[in-house]
Amino acid sequence: MNDTICAIATSQGVGAIAIIRVSGEDSIKIVNKIFKGKDLEKVQSHTINYGHIIDNDKIIDEVLVSVMKAPKTYTTEDTVEINTHGGISPTNRVLELLLENGCRLAEPGEFTKRAFLNGRIDLLEAEAVMDMINSKTETQRQMASNQLNGKVSNLINDLRSDMAQIISNINVNIDYPEYDDVDIMTNEILLPKINNLKTKIEKILQESKNGKIIKEGINTSIIGRPNVGKSSLLNALLNEDKAIVTDIAGTTRDIVEGQINLNGILLNIIDTAGIRKTDDKIEAIGVEKSFQMINKSDLILLMLNANEKLTKDIEDIIDKIKDKKFLIIINKIDLENKLDRSKINIPNNKIVELSILEDKGIDNLKNKIIDMFNIAEIETKDPTYLNNTRSISILKNCLNSIKEVEKGINNNLPIDMIELDIKNIWEELGKINGTYYEEELLDEMFSRFCLGK
């Protein structure tokens, strides 16, 4: 943390400009060594300065240099950003000069890591930085923005504040029993407070399902027998020829993937190999993958043909997916009907009829998915949700611990034992926003960041 780091903050390649970011105690001094223009050590903070980057007397590039002095910077350290002409050669040469004059190449995510360690942002806000960078939809951007602005952190801070109040009241009762003006914290008084905490945690976890849908999308598998129109459906949903479509059974031998934006939510669509018995080893591997995707998917679209009778293997699949979120899609309704729908034994609201050839029913299918996942409701709400696996896992553990505390109160455990359990949960919650953390966790988390972020 005492050294000065640098990295290219923009994407490598040809562009109008590139930005090299420098942060640390000697950042202004080091950049000043290779800058011809104003004395950067004497300029005002948060100013942009015109000049040239030089190597001895040789001009490397014409640049604009932003000088931002601590503590009002991203990392809270002195920070300099050099705006060069875009392209691999000028940016790399400027980076080389910085390294030659005392900088160290930043590790992935090290600028944000310093912002966290220096107390400018908490761990949830740090994670939101990469969510903002990776956002593909407006809903993802809004959710990342709310987390970056501290709205999600406030959910956790409020929980910890409530628990801190309980802990402090119990401690005062234990340490200063002679105080008459302090409420005596008995199990009867404590139980509704614990129930209230449990309700709040359950609400956050319930809404986190929306957060995961926004962040990760809905993993959707299209399954069915060969030639029912799975690849055609994928192409119709994507509005492009992503999958090869032929009349030959077994054309799709591996999964084919694509994404669509459905009212701000990504649908991660997978076209699987047609399910049937086959002696073709390669096709058999594809069929096995199709069955594996059933277990991994958030939504299953099981396609049938209106002009084909229902087979035993499809009846088995319907039975296999009945406890998951699914829709039965009956394709080719423009052809003679041979499908006995009474054998499907599925509610009508889970059946979608369409003709991909005649472009009928696709909008109805999309609307069914919107209703099934409450996408319309998610879209209209302010998306302030816990959304990463690490935080959700910690909160689930805290919920289980709160339930154990509840049992302990009902079994009349001593109040000082209850207090220890509550304090442990309070500390565990602190791992979500980084009040408590392990260095190994930080290293792993920030290693997934961009080099210049």
Image: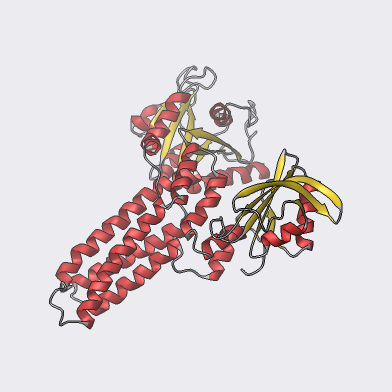
Task: Please tell me which residue lies in front, 412 or 151.
Answer: 151
- The quarter of the rendered structure image containing the N terminus is bottom right
Task: Please tell me which residue lies in front, 120 or 436.
Answer: 120
Task: Note whether residue 165 is visible.
Answer: yes
Compared across the picture, whether 380 is left or right of 248 comes to: left
Q: Which residue is at 52% across, 22% downward?
A: 356
Task: Please tell me which residue lies in front, 299 or 20.
Answer: 20
* Residue 447 image point, x, y percent: 61, 60
Compared across the picture, whether 55 is left or right of 388 comes to: right
* Residue 348 image point, x, y percent: 34, 29
Q: In this rendering, is residue 299 above or below 198?
A: above
Q: Which residue is at 42% across, 53% downward?
A: 150
Task: Please tell me which residue lies in front, 337 or 134.
Answer: 134
Number of dots carrying numbers: 0
Q: In this rendering, is residue 384 above or below 365?
A: below
- Colour setup of the view: secondary structure
Compared across the picture, whether 352 is left or right of 44 comes to: left
Q: Which residue is at 53% across, 46% downward?
A: 132
Task: Note whether residue 298 is visible.
Answer: no
- The quarter of the rendered structure image containing the C terminus is bottom right
* Residue 126 image point, x, y percent: 51, 56
* Residue 221 image point, x, y percent: 51, 39
